[in-house]
Each structure stands twice: as structure tokens, then as C-alpha cells.
Image: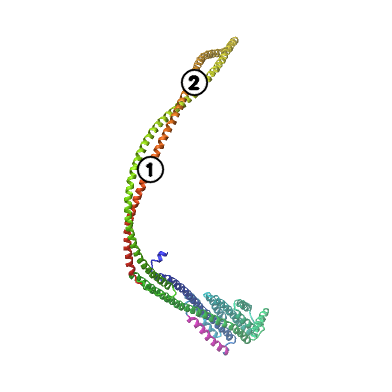
Amino acid sequence: MHSLLRRFQLYIIVSIVAGIPLLISIFLASNTILDFNRQAKMSEVDREAIKMVILFDNLAHNLAVERGLTAGVLGSKGNPDQVAALGQQRGKADQAIAALRSYKPELLNSTFVNMLVSDITQQLSQLNNVRAGVDKLAPTIAPFGYYSNLNQLAIDNSRLMLSQVGNYQLGALGESLVSIIIMKERAGQVRGALNGVFARGQATPVLYANIQGYISSGDYAKRSAMLELPPQFKQQLQNQERNQVWQQVESIQKSFLSQSEQLDAINGPTSQEWFKLATERITLINQVRNLLQGEMNTLSEQRAASAIMTRNVLTIGAAVLSFLFAWIVIATVTNLRSRVGSLTSKLSEMAKRCDLSVDLDQTGRDEIASIAASVNQLNHAIRHLIQDVKETNDHSTERLSQIIATSGELDSSGQETIAKCDNIATAMTELSQSSVEIAHSAERATEDTDNMNQQVLECQSQSTLSFNSVKSLLAQIDATQHCMHELESDTQSIGQIVATINAVSEQTNLLALNAAIEAARAGEHGRGFAVVSSEVRDLAQRSQEATESISKLLDKIRDNTKSAVDNMAKSKQASDETFHSVDVVKQSVEKLESAIEQVNQHISSIANATIEQSKASEAIDKDVDVLADIAHRTGSHANNLNEIVNGYQAEVHRVQGKLHEFKL
């Protein structure tokens, strides 16, 4: 890694080291900006979705009011005041319809939005027919059911549109708003239905069941709202419930539900009183709805504005910081390149011109200033060193002149020493030659005695071999004599065995004879036995003949063995005499060897003394030669020293010239 970094200039390395983190920071900042941009876009989507929810809610609210006024017109048989109020409300409803149709969200899924709006538009296509029938007081399409279905479709669309909201808080507020809208819608349905009941004073079981369902559905919606509403809106709804108008409406509804057994004669307020109270309660619910709408609008706008603001601030901050960091890196690299270049150029100038009077710029506290200060210190130290070297060089020149004179005197002394050593070497050479001749004579005498001693040793070796051979022969004769005695004993044993076999054969022959006699007595029955006894007798006869032959052979072996034993005794006696003679010869040879050894020792003593004298002479001669050689080498070294000193003196002059090249 170090070798790789040394291949590049320092400012390039610094640019890379500082630039890579900067690029990484810019990349991370860009990702963060893109993330905040996505959040801003999601906030815009949430804002458009909330806008659509509010548009659907406004449509449902205005149609619900129109539904109530329509019921009043039909119930009053065209009361002018009711007709005028209905006309004004129709204008508001048309504005809500136009607002829904004209709004074109840019970020929401256009297919999804168009599908929701087209369903509403399809239902609204019959609105004019419904209104025309109401104006004629002869509707062909039931207004109450039409408006209720249309409002329910708007509520469903609001709930579906809330699925496009990504923020949890906005989604929770939207769900709360839908619950409030359902409460308001059910309150409007109850208002219209009971308005007709109180106007007629009676109700059908189907209508009673529908009203009961509207009230129950409203209670469920209120329960959902209480669970979903934020604390401040929940408190607002609870305050509205404690309102006197709300309590009166609840009381009237309970009174109606308690008259399920007398639907033909319903007791209650007049339709005008009921409609007024129910409308006021719807107004109370609508106040909570308006607060929720305002909160959702405010929250969506704040989130979108906050996301956009954060994105813009982050973008500007990242751009400013990136520019600032880039400027710092560029300024640092430029300054580093300039200072390092100045330092390098001055060092190069100092090296080329040998100018040590140049001082580097060491202002600052960074590493480059430290390097410049260290180089300046080194430069000052080199100046003092060169000055000291110059002075030392001058002193060395004077001492070299003295050494040259001394080496000349040493050369003359060496020549005189060489002449004296040559005279001593000649005398020692003559003495050494005389000692060598004496030593050669002693060596020849020693060689002769060594030859005699060698022959005696060979004789002694032969006598020893003869002695050992005779001794071995005696041992073998003793062993052979012992074997012959054992052989004689064994032949006697074999004779006894042969006698035993002969006796057995005779006995067998007698038994065979007796068997033949018994077989003859048996007559025809003993014929086979007679044949066997005849064969046995023949075998016994042959065994007896064989034993007689063995006995004769054993007699011959005994005679031969006895002769061999006698001969072995004579051989042993002769061997004993030979052994004694060989022993005497061996002892004589050993005495002769001892005498020759003594003579050889005397000659060796003379030879050794002569050799020692010769060696001493040679040593002296060698010492003289060494001394002469030392004298020669001393002279040679003196000459070499003179040459070296002369060369060193020339080098000193050259160094002195080089030192004068430096500018101090």
C-alpha cells in the first residue's frame, strides 16, 4: 500500500482521499433528497385524496339537505317557503356536483378516481328527473330512496378514497370523518322518515323497521367515531350530545320506537317541530364534520408544505455544503500543491547549485512547515559540518606530508634489514644441510633395523601360527581318540544287540516248528496255519543268518577300531613333542625381537636428535626468511603507504575542491 501511494503526487492523493468522501456525502444527500421528494409527493397524494374525500362529503351533505327539503315540499304539498328553500339548496348541491366534476387530481391514480366519479355521475344523471317529479308533486322515482342511495355511494367513495392516504394520522381522521358522515346521513334519513310519519300521524311496519335501522346504524357510526376520533374532537362530539336539541331528538326517537304497537296512531311533535329539531341536530353533527374537514385540510397542507420545505431546505443545504466542501478541498489541494511545489523547487535548486545558503519558508503549523523547519535545521547542521570538514581536511594535508617523510625513512631501514637477513640465511642454510645428511644416515639405519624387526615379526607370526596349529591338532587328536573309544564301546553294545536278535530268531524258529507240528495234528484245518508257520520259520532262519553276518562285520570293526585307537595314541605322543619344540622356537623369536627393538630405539634416539637439530636449523632459517620477508613487506608496505598517502593527498585536494563548491 505504501509503495502504491508513493507512485502518485501528494496533492493527487489528497484530492482522492478528500474527494471520495465528498462524493459519497453528495450521493447520500441526493438519496435523502430523493427520499424527502418521495415523501413530499406522498404528501401531495394525501392532500389530493383528502380533497376528494371532502368533495364526496360535501356532495353527500348537500344532497342530504336537499333530500330533507324535498320531503318537506312533498309533505307540505308545495309550501312556497319550502319550495324556495329547496331551490336554494339545489343550487348548493349543483355547486358541490360541479366542484367534484371539475377537480382533476394530478398524482392520484386517474383510473381509480375516474371509476369513483363515473359511478356518482351515472347516479346523478337521474337527478333532474327526480327534481322534476318533486316540482310537480308527483315524483316517478322515490326521492328519499334515490338521495339515500346517492349519499351512500358518496360515503363509500370517501371510504375507498381513504385507502389512497399514506399517512396514518390523516387516515385515522378520514375514518373518523366517514363515521361522522354516516351519523349525519342516518340522522337525515331519520329526519325525513319521521317527518312523514308525524305529518300523517301513522307509520307502516316496514317504515318503522327502516327508521329503527337508521337509528341503529347511526348509533354504530357514533360508536366508531368515539373510538377513532382524536381526543379534542371526541370531546366536541360529547359536548354536542349534551346539547338540549340533541337530547330532545333522542327523546322523540325513543318515544317513536316505543309505539311499535300503535303504528296507526303515532303520538309526537308536529312535522314542522320535528323537522326543525332534527335539522338543528344535523347542524350540530355538521359542526363536528366541519372541524374534522378543517383539521384534515390543515394537516394535509402542513404535511405537504413541511415535506416540500424540508426537501427544498435539504437540497439547498446539500448544495451549499457540497459547494463549500468542494471549495475547501480545492483550496486545500491548491495550497498544498503550491507549497509542496515551492518546497520541491527550492530543494532541487539547492541540490543542483550546492547552495546551502537558501532557507525554506517555515511559516505555519502544518506538516509542510515542520518539514521546512527540519530541512533548515539540517541545512544549518550541514553548513557547520562542511566548515568542520574543511578545517579537518587542512590538518589532514599537513599530517599526510609528515607521513610521506616517515614512510621514506622506513623504506631505507627495511633495505638494510634485508641485507643483514640474507647473510644470516646463508650461514643457517649450510648448517641445515649438515644436519640433514646426519639425519639421512640415521634414517637409513633405522630403516635397516625396521626391516630386521619386520622379518622377526614375520617369523614370530609363523611360529605363533605353527604353535596354534599344533595346539589345535592336539585338541583334534584328543577329540578323535575320545570318539574312537566311544565307537569301540558302541560296537560292543551293537554285538550285544545282535546276540539278542539271534536268540530271538532261534526262539522264533522253535515257535514256528511247534506251530507246524500243531498244524499237522489239525490236519486239513491246520493247513493254512502250517503255511504261515513255514513262512515264519523261513524269516527266522534268514534273520539268524543276517545276525551272524552282522556279528562277523562287528568283529572286523572292533579290530580296526582298536588299531585306530593305538595309532591315535602314537600320533598324540608325536604331536606333544612337536608342540614343545614349537614353543621353544617361539620363545627364542620373542627374545630376538626384544634385542632388535632395543637397537632400533638407540638408532631412533640418534635420528631424532639429528632431526631436532635439523628442524631447529630449518626453523632458524625460516625465521630468518620470515624476517627477510617481513623486511621486504615492510619496504613494500612503506612504498604502498607512500602511494596510498599520495593518493589520499590527491583525494583530500579533490574533496577540498568539492567543499569549496558549496555556498555557505
Label 2 Cα crowd, 10 Å radius (few <14 / some 14-19 / many 20+): some
Quadrant of the image occupied by residue 147: bottom right
Residue 316 covered by magenta stretch = no
Q: Are marks 1 and 2 in contact (CB under 8 Å)?
A: no
Tag of residue 572: 2
Left or right for 119, reference 246: left
**Mark 2: which amino acid?**
Lys
| Range drawn in magenta | 81-103
Quadrant of the image occupied by residue 515: top right
Q: Is residue 159 above or below residue 81?
A: above
Q: Quadrant of the C terminus?
A: bottom left
Q: Main secondary structure of the magenta part?
A: helix
Relative to the observer, which residue lies in front, 585 or 415? 415
Tag of residue 615: 1
Q: Is residue 238 above or below residue 384?
A: below
Relative to the observer, which residue lies in front, 208 or 483? 483
